[in-house]
Each structure stands twice: as structure tokens, then as C-alpha cells.
């Protein structure tokens, strides 16, 4: 037990340290790439109304006359203390600027995740418990089909048939007040469908493969000979061992879910964090850009760490070998 606890603590510490390092590297890369864009916030926002001297004054007021390295380190220092800075474009606190869009993105991702796990697990078990059957072939073919279609293509196809031809669902969020989004859930249907279909497809096949692998193991045959019931066999013996690899994949699926949500937001004009990021890039609003990257990166790190811990709990011996 003590050895397992040490392995568990080592796993958590290593994943947290690795995630923090990845987040810092990501922030540095994003900041450097933003510097390569033509112009800065003062140029973009005021180039048609201010003289060159006035633009220089504006640049000083925004702190853009300071070296990029100093600006970046200063932002990091304040962000660690919970201060994400002030938006160059609006003059508001960055936290207030991104709070609303993040709530919308979180709502979309949360609904997709709530549907994703039961759909993927149910379909994977349905296919894996009857390998080679017509049911297995149908589920596998559908998952491969969805996995091979890019998000934006699937979105266009669904809009064409469900919105334009059948007029069943709204095709875009344009003109919708984000504050009334919960009162108009029909606007979420197509974005959620696209997100779940693309992200669930590889997870379904992985769950299926895990179930098929576990069913072939000797202890399952022995449990059947001992008279273990079907439900008990699935819950106590097959599921923990079959889902352990899928839990590791779910971490990568979490990253895919986040990136997929951002793509879906852009396609359907959802007023979420993707739209805010595009606007910040257009305005060269570095504090907003860095804050969005920091928050999304932190979410990805936390999700992957939780998934690794869950995988360890489901299969401690395999995780112990991986993290020793």
C-alpha cells in the first residue's frame, strides 16, 4: 500500500510539473508568434485617427514601448497573483472580458462531455461484446466515418440537411443574445452534435478494442465457469480492465474536445472564447490572447492529470510500471 501511495504521489507530482512546463512553453510560443504579426495594438486601433506622435503616446500609455521580454515577464508575474491585466482594446480587466465567452464555451463543452462518455462507452461495449457481428460492423463503420470527416465539413453537411433543407434547427448563432442562450437550447444542438460525433468516434473504437481484449483473457472464462452473472461480469471484471486504456485516451480526447469546440464555435459563430480570441488577435490585444491561452492550457493540464489519476485508480499495476 505504501508503495502504491508513493507511485500515486509521484504520478501526480510529475504530471503537474510536466503540465506547468508545457504551459509556460505554450505561452512563450504564443507571445513570440503574436510579436511576428504586423503592427501592434496602437497601430491597429488608432492608425486612422491619430498622428504618428499621438500613436507613440498611445504606445507609451499601453506599455508597448517596454521591451517584449519585460512585458511578458511582468504579465506572468501578475497572472500568477490572479491579475490577468487590462485589455488594450477596451481598457477593461481581462478577467471580465473573457468571463462571458468562457461561460459559453464551457456550457458547450460541458454538454458535449456529458453526452460523450456514455455514448462512447455504451457503443464501445455494444460492439466489443459481440465482435464480428452486424452490430459491431455497423458501430465500427459509423465511428470510422465520423472520424474521417473534418469538423467543419460535418458542420456544413448538418447545416445543409437539418437547417436549410429540413428547417429543423438554427444554422448559426448570429443575432442571438448570449444571455438568453439557456432559453434557446435549440441553438446548441448542431454544435454539440458535431463536437460529440468527431470526438467520440476514436474513443468508441478504443473501448471496443479493450472489451474484446479482456473477453479473451483466461480469468473471464474462469469467471463464467464459476457462474458469475453477466451484469457482475461486466461491471466488476470487464469494465475496469477494458476502460483503463480508454481513460488514458480520454485525456487526449479532452484536448480534442477543447480544440473541436473552438472550431465549432468559429463555424457556427458561437459567441464563445474562439470568437474572443479571433478578435484579440485582430486587435493585437496581447493580455487577452495570453489570458485565453493560459486558461485553456491550464484546463487541458488539469483534465489530463485527472484522467491519468483515474486511469491509475482503475489499473494501478499498469500505471505503476509506466510511472516508476
Image: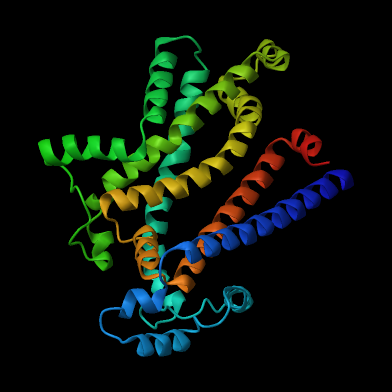
Which residue is located at x 42 percent, y 78 percent?
A: 87
Which residue is located at x 88 percent, y 44 percent?
A: 3
Residue 116 appears in the figure: yes
Up/down of 98 relative to 4, above or below: below
Please state the horizontal and vertical placement of residue 291, each as a whole percent of the image.
50, 68
Residue 166 appears in the figure: no
Please state the horizontal and vertical placement of residue 85, each as a whole percent of the image.
50, 79
Please state the horizontal and vertical placement of residue 60, each as a whole percent of the image.
47, 88
- Side of 208 where 103 appears, left or right: left
Q: Nearer the viewer, residue 47 or 124?
A: 47
Please state the horizontal and vertical placement of residue 249, each as a whole percent of the image.
58, 36
The image quarter containing residue 310 is top right
Question: Which quadrant does the N terminus fall into?
Answer: top right
- Side of 147 where 316 appears, left or right: right
Colour convention = rainbow
In the orientation shown, which residue stands out farthest toward the front?
Answer: 52
Q: Nearer the viewer, residue 136 or 197?
A: 197
The image quarter containing residue 88 is bottom left
In the orientation shown, which residue stands out farthest toward the right?
Answer: 2
Question: Which quadrant does the C terminus fall into?
Answer: top right
- Side of 144 where 63 appears, left or right: right
Up/down of 7 relative to 25, above or below: above
Which residue is located at x 61 percent, y 73 percent?
A: 69
Which residue is located at x 66 percent, y 26 percent?
A: 237
Looking at the rendered structure, the number of numbered marks drawn on it comes to 0
Amino acid at each position: 500500500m505504501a508503495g502504491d501511495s508513493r507511485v500515486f504521489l509521484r504520478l501526480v507530482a510529475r504530471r503537474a510539473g510536466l503540465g506547468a512546463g508545457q504551459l509556460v512553453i505554450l505561452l512563450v510560443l504564443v507571445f513570440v508568434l503574436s510579436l511576428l504579426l504586423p503592427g501592434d495594438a496602437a497601430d491597429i486601433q488608432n492608425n486612422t485617427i491619430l498622428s504618428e506622435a499621438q500613436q507613440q503616446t498611445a504606445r507609451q500609455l499601453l506599455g508597448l514601448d517596454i521591451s517584449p521580454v519585460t512585458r511578458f515577464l511582468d504579465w506572468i508575474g501578475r497572472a500568477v497573483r490572479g491579475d490577468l491585466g487590462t485589455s488594450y482594446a477596451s481598457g477593461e480587466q481581462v478577467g471580465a472580458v473573457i468571463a462571458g465567452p468562457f461561460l459559453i464555451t464551457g456550457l458547450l463543452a460541458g454538454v458535449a462531455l456529458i453526452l460523450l462518455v456514455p455514448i462512447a462507452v455504451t457503443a464501445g461495449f455494444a460492439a466489443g461484446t459481440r465482435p464480428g457481428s452486424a452490430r459491431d460492423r455497423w458501430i465500427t463503420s459509423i465511428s470510422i466515418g465520423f472520424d474521417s470527416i473534418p469538423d467543419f465539413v460535418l458542420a456544413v453537411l448538418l447545416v445543409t440537411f437539418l437547417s436549410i433543407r429540413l428547417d429543423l434547427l438554427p444554422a448559426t448563432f448570429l443575432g442571438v443574445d448570449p444571455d438568453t442562450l439557456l432559453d434557446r437550447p435549440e441553438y446548441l444542438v448542431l454544435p454539440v452534435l458535431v463536437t460529440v460525433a468527431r470526438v467520440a468516434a476514436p474513443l468508441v473504437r478504443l473501448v471496443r478494442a479493450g472489451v474484446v481484449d479482456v473477453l479473451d483473457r483466461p480469468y473471464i472464462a474462469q469467471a463464467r465457469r464459476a457462474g458469475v452473472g453477466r451484469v457482475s461480469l461486466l461491471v466488476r471484471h470487464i469494465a475496469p480492465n477494458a476502460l483503463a486504456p480508454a481513460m488514458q485516451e480520454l485525456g487526449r480526447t479532452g484536448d480534442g474536445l477543447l480544440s473541436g469546440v473552438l472550431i465549432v464555435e468559429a463555424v457556427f459563430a458561437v459567441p464563445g472564447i474562439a470568437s474572443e480570441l479571433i478578435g484579440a488577435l485582430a486587435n493585437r490585444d496581447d493580455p487577452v490572447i495570453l489570458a485565453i491561452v493560459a486558461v485553456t492550457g491550464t484546463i487541458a493540464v488539469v483534465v489530463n492529470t485527472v484522467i491519468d489519476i483515474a486511469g491509475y485508480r482503475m489499473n494501478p499495476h499498469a500505471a505503476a510500471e509506466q510511472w516508476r
